[in-house]
Amino acid sequence: MTTLFAILFYTAFAVLLAGLGFKIAQFARTPAPLKIPTTPGPITTPGIAFRLGREAVLFESLFKSNKPLWIFAIIFHFGLFVVLARHLRYFQEPVWFWVGLVQPFGLYAGLAMVAGLGLLLLRRFVIDRVVYVTSPSDILMLLLLLGIGITGLGMTTLAHTDIIAVKAFFLGLMRFSIQPLPTDPALLVHLALVAVLMIVFPFSKLLHAPGLFFSPTRNQKDDPRERRHLSDWAAKLEAGRN
Amino acid sequence: MKRITFRELTPMTTGWLALMGALLVVAAIAGAAVLYMEHQGHWVTGMTNQVVWGTPHVFAIFLIVAASGALNVASIGSVFGREPYQPLGRLSGLLAIALLAGGLAVLVLDLGRPDRLIVAMTHFNFKSIFAWNVILYSGFFAIVGAYLWTMMDWKMKGYYKGAAVTAFVWRLVLTTGTGSIFGFLMARDAYNSAVMAPLFIAMSFAFGLAAFILVVMGAYAGSGRPVAPELVTRMGRLLGLFCAANLYFVAVQHLTALYMADRGAVEAFILADGGIYTLLFWGVQVALGGLVPMAILFSKNATRCTVRFAAILVMIGGFAQVYVILIGGQAFPLNLFPGMEVSSSFQDGVVGTYAPSLPEVLLGIGGFAVAGLITLVGATFLRILPDSLAAD
Amino acid sequence: TGQAWAGDISPVIPKAQGACVDEPQAMRRHHFDYLKHQRDDTLRSGIRGAKYSLKECVSCHALRGHDGKAVPVNAEGQFCQSCHSYAAVSIDCFTCHATVPDKAPKTAGVTQ
Amino acid sequence: MADIDVPVLGDPAEREIPAIHPGAMAGSKPYVAQAVHQEPLGFAGELPEDWQAKALGRMGDLLGRYRSLQVFMDICVKCGACTDKCHYFIGTGDPKNMPVARQDLFRSVYRRYFTPAGRALGAIGLGSLVGAKEFTRELLDEWFNYFHQCSQCRRCSVFCPYGIDTAEVSMAARDVMNHIGMGHKYANEIIGKVHKIGNNLGLPAPALLDTLEGLEEDVKDETGQDVKFPIDVEGAEVLLVTPSADFFAEPHVLGLIGYAKVFHAAGISWTLSTKASEAGNFGMFIGNYEQMRKISMRIREAAQELKVKRIVFGECGHAWRVAYSFLNTLAGPWDFLDPRYPVPQHILEVTDGLIKKGGIKLDKSGNDGMVLTVHDSCNVARASRMGDCPGGQFTIPRDVIKASVPKFVDMHPDTTHEKTFCCGGGGGLLTDELLDLRVKGAKPRMEALKDVIDREGVTHMAAMCAICKAQFTKILPIYGYDREMVVSVHQLVSNSILLGNND
Amino acid sequence: MTETTRRDLLKGAAGAVVLAPGLTLIAAKAQARAPGSAASAANRFGLLIDTGKCDSGCTACVDACKTEMGLTGHDRPATDVQYIRKVNVKDPATGAAHSVPVMCQHCAKPPCVDVCPTGASMKRADGIVLVDRHICIGCRYCMMACPYKARSFAHEDQTNQREANPRGKGCVEACTLCAHRIDAGAKPACVEACAATGKAAILFGDLADPNSELSRRVAAEASTRIRADLGTGPAVRYQGI
Ligand code: HEM
Ligand code: HEM
Ligand code: SF4
Ligand code: SF4
Ligand code: SF4
Ligand code: SF4
Ligand code: SF4
Ligand code: SF4
């Protein structure tokens, strides 16, 4: 079991890193030939950082468009964020101070995350417009995260696992020294699903996390009259112009 | 047929940034004060084993009581169908939530073990009026939240009336509950009385409306939106009425107590020889916070300016009132051996000394900042304020 | 897990002598639940002397220093703390509870 | 117009989201361009045998050229936040008019042919699992229909948590279709006219001169002032580029008179140009950078030839987007113009500045009896700016209107500023065969208008876009209102401006 | 704990109750409960304090309590913890003076328990009123409610706690009637200390056991309870005031 999971996680990590690296490089390299920020928008660089920050943290546009969805999304993502922050403890020694501080919120964050996912899933079955645009992969994605969340919560509340050994396993992986992994079923399912998540991440809509920061309607300054914006391929068209 | 258009406040204007910045700074200072107090322990505050609730509780109770009163305007508009008040219902609901949150924040941050807040929300002793209050407060958030939703989402219109009535009843119960925190304390001569509940309701009406008037005037002046002067003076007259009710129950409170022989000592303490408490009672609570504003508000030529001034006086008087009830009541010694002279190493038989310490006061002010932040953020991101309150 | 722990990968947990009140594997996973359960039993019902007493944990797991005095169990590198700092678990038990037994530690060896 | 169901207008504050009616607009499509309109623009004349390969090739090109397209294809989470934001969906209930569903026509092809998961699963027939679809002829037809039911108004992008802009996808799709001979007749015909004659309406220079002379006479008769309408005047300070509708159609032309009066009153020398006698740039509607650039270059040439110091654009929404956001990119740099002025300027920026500095004087009584509201044109509102600060595109027109009329009222806040609803005729859809769509798409705007008419006694709605004005003059009567309700902003200025003794 | 042992122990406890009447002679010495058995409602522990025997200069009980419970002061009388204090009572009419040790009265109807929001203040089956400091949030409402001012708040970090009395900053605490000693069959520390001075002013015993010395004396001699008018039913009785 230990070896199997070691191989699984090395593979998953490789896929995640390569896939995500490729996608981000692709997003970054693809030129944006025209200025298309949604206006009114910021006209300075700090303004852009602030806009993206609001979108990433507060989901500002979503707030404008759909309050219930915003609440569900916030519940889920904030829960997810805290859960992930809390998980950092498995991968570092010594553990950062602030990671220690969020530990007590794991259970509540986990519950929030699962509740948020449940509500988001429900939406996919009851709102006719959302049903229409949903494809099976959208539902599978939510189920996958739900599976991870529920097994995780199971470990936090009912079937505790040996945290020390889990951490040793992961620290070991990071130092190429394989340590035994406890064989509690909840843990094994949790980890297997996490590996699946890591593998599908670069090929799925989860790309929205990095993608937001590359979205030209949000990350461009509204200054086309002040600064000439010219992409490489467009510049080539100018050869021989007066 | 005129439609009331509700519009968000415009963020990032100079005034908005200044207000936001100021509120954040005050809240941050309060946060620092809390860290200091929690790290050192409560001995750095003015609170002792005799006066166990201090300035933070004065602020908290003031805010909580005002919260329930701030809902008045919405209730008058929807439960009692007074149209001029209807456009202000949303602000009234938001302010109620904000004040309550500010008050609770202060209360929670003064706990000996604020890290165990979750315990407070998962362990209930149903005999405790305090535990009931936890439920009443959470319920207040939920119900006023729902009420706001019915005001703001047309699809929820059908539930508007129901939510309004529920909120109205709930907040009466809530203030009763807050008053009963004191009313049920048979150990303390200053409290143990049924009149505490109606007294707190009258207080809530007055403080809440005063706070509401100030916020409305501030918001409209700040955002350059028009307000009809008649609306202000009308609210002012209502405030005068609530002040009178408050004074009436204060009179009942003390007169009934004077009638009971065993309360003589504590009454003498508050009314005659309690030093600072007596001064606060007569000078600030009764005169400055009751009689003067009433004179102003019922005068024929009340203006926007005088109403604002009166509302500020009501707030100050109310603060003194809570201070006298809370701290004065605790400072007066417990009576273990009636009729005897007592002394001990544990301050038996002496008037408890209490002097507010700076961190406590900062924490309390932080409660106002939290309430202000919630109101500002709410009115910035939600359609809370009518575009215009001008008469047409 | 009869495994040689590699220092920087796993925590070094000071050993007590004899046997724990329960299977070490079970203790690793569940000691906090046991303690919590017992805590309520002792405090609220007055049940004394049951298996998972915090007093008992301390009395076995507190090591002795070179001076012969017991070392607090929550000190850096000591029994409770060795795991808890590794797993980033902070417990407030020892803001109240004594960290050394009133009497000399029952079984534990000397710290390095 | 018997065959159009005119939507029933509700209350804009209490708008129901329609239930979905699949296929409701499946039949709505514009005419396909003929080879005569396609080939001069360098597009395929008709659909070739291997259209699919060609289309996929072009898609690949565009994905590599436009970050917007690549990112938008990957990151939509199908949250549905945009679904109820499109006026065409609100007006028709056709689920394919929900922005995300419209994108999905494109995205399903992207997934099938450009993503590993779609390629792998698609190959074994399980593409639908990840929303991948074969690019069939039927799907191509859907593309043609539904990408011509998007006015590229960007309302959806305001509400999408990632700013996904369906307009970008529509543009890309139209470009792909042009490359395989499935062009849109109306748009491509017009682009052809711009290249040949200089403006969208195909007004030749003599006709233009004639019209302008007529206008000078009219204004003289009306005001007694010698207000000039100069054209091709070398050395003028300002080159005014304005949509060609301003030369004759009402209420557009009343706006043009307004511009002339403003320049006259402020003493600014200006000129039109026969070469650049069109502000509009339909290159944007078909998503073709090269066309857009070619059309823009005329303005550069005209400015250089006429040796002007400033370029000012007349009232037009998409024209202003191309001018404000793209002109510097497409035809810049503008270092030969006066650096004290932004390039280009909007006529409203000029007028607003003059009003505020006292350079012109207005007398509101010129518009007595009028109660105005304003329609924020979508390309002005969400794709460009006026003035120095974000949001100037909302305050400047309102300031000018308020300075010109006795009473102004805004429509419901959900339908103004960046949340404004398209008039229903933008994005190259202003063609008669799409009238049904245009009427239905105008529903949200008409609701908001009806609301202020009923409650506030609004008599007129100002618009600052040639397409909006044209659309409204057509649509208003269908909804039972007077076509003259829609006015140019500068028409109001024209009515109120004091000419002559201006000192 | 496995099921069998628990059941066995309960049986043992039940047995002890049944046996109790037969143990009259040594009843004054409380029995150590069998390990694993719960405090029983068959007991009602209390004190009888004879103020006549108590001396105003003596603080042996107070000191013993401090040692037993690990209470360290900081020379800040207003905020330092006191489980037991000496109150000097003087009748202004007669000039008669007493020195009275006052601690938690382990009320039968404790107001502190009624008001506590979390249930941290609680009454054990045998009548001992305790603060479960694991769930005390430090709100101090119980201190507001206690008519005897019996409770203290830990105003600062604590060190050198005794094993038997874990205590820390931010919680409210009070006399536990030395529950840990009672459970082990011993008398409260203050009672022992007073006996050691030779004054033996404090008598500990089981009020529920009619044959205990405490019960017999309470039945035979006049005793009062502080503020009996409040109806809290203290388990601490006083003689001589
Ligand atoms: C910068 C980080 C992120 C931002 C700003 C962000 C934002 C959003 C927003 C605004 C939505 C749409 C609302 C909704 O449907 O719930 C969404 C959906 C979603 N996000 Fe994120 N997200 C981020 C990171 C992540 C990560 C790291 C994951 C997963 C590991 C994730 C998983 C999801 C999923 C599964 C949905 C779809 C919910 C549904 O199907 O309804 N997000 N995200
Ligand atoms: C390799 C990576 C991961 C490891 C080793 C891991 C391991 C664990 C363990 C041991 C627990 C139990 C915690 C306890 O009992 O206190 C847990 C809980 C949980 N995990 Fe993970 N997990 C991983 C990744 C993830 C990911 C990616 C997610 C979310 C998408 C997730 C979601 C959760 C949740 C919601 C809980 C319950 C709440 C909590 O305890 O924080 N885990 N995980
Ligand atoms: S709002 Fe954006 S992310 Fe959500 S479905 Fe629409 S396009 Fe996709
Ligand atoms: S750009 Fe406008 S028309 Fe096109 S899909 Fe978005 S909202 Fe609809
Ligand atoms: S004396 Fe006070 S603390 Fe003790 S039980 Fe009675 S009320 Fe509670
Ligand atoms: S301080 Fe503790 S014991 Fe006292 S009432 Fe509050 S929670 Fe209960
Ligand atoms: S019984 Fe114990 S805790 Fe109570 S006063 Fe006596 S010694 Fe102190
Ligand atoms: S030890 Fe005995 S005599 Fe001394 S003070 Fe205490 S009760 Fe009185």
Image (cartoon, coloured by chain):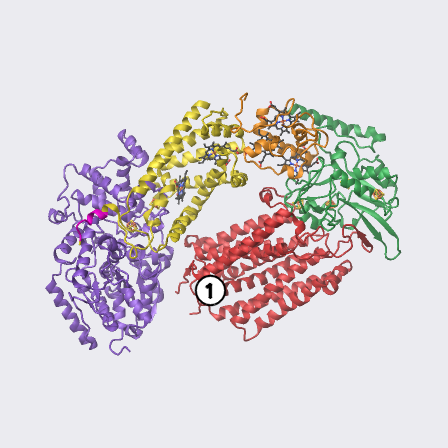
Chain colours: A yellow, B red, C orange, D purple, E green
Q: Inspect this view and state whether residue B110 appears.
A: no
What's the residue at 41%, 35% (across, down)?
Answer: A143
* Residue A54: percent from left, percent from top: 42, 50
Residue E18, compared with residue B223, is above or below; it is above
Q: Inspect this view and state whether residue B331 appears.
A: yes
* Residue C107: percent from left, percent from top: 68, 25
The one nearer the camera, B307 or C63, is: C63
The one nearer the camera, D207 or C66, is: C66
Residue E228, compared with residue D207, is above or below; it is above
The one nearer the camera, B223 or E234, is: B223
Q: Which residue is mark 1?
A: B222
* Residue A29: percent from left, percent from top: 30, 42
- At label 1, the amino acid type is Gly
Q: Over which residues does the magenta segment extend?
A: A234-241
In what element is the residue under mark 1?
helix
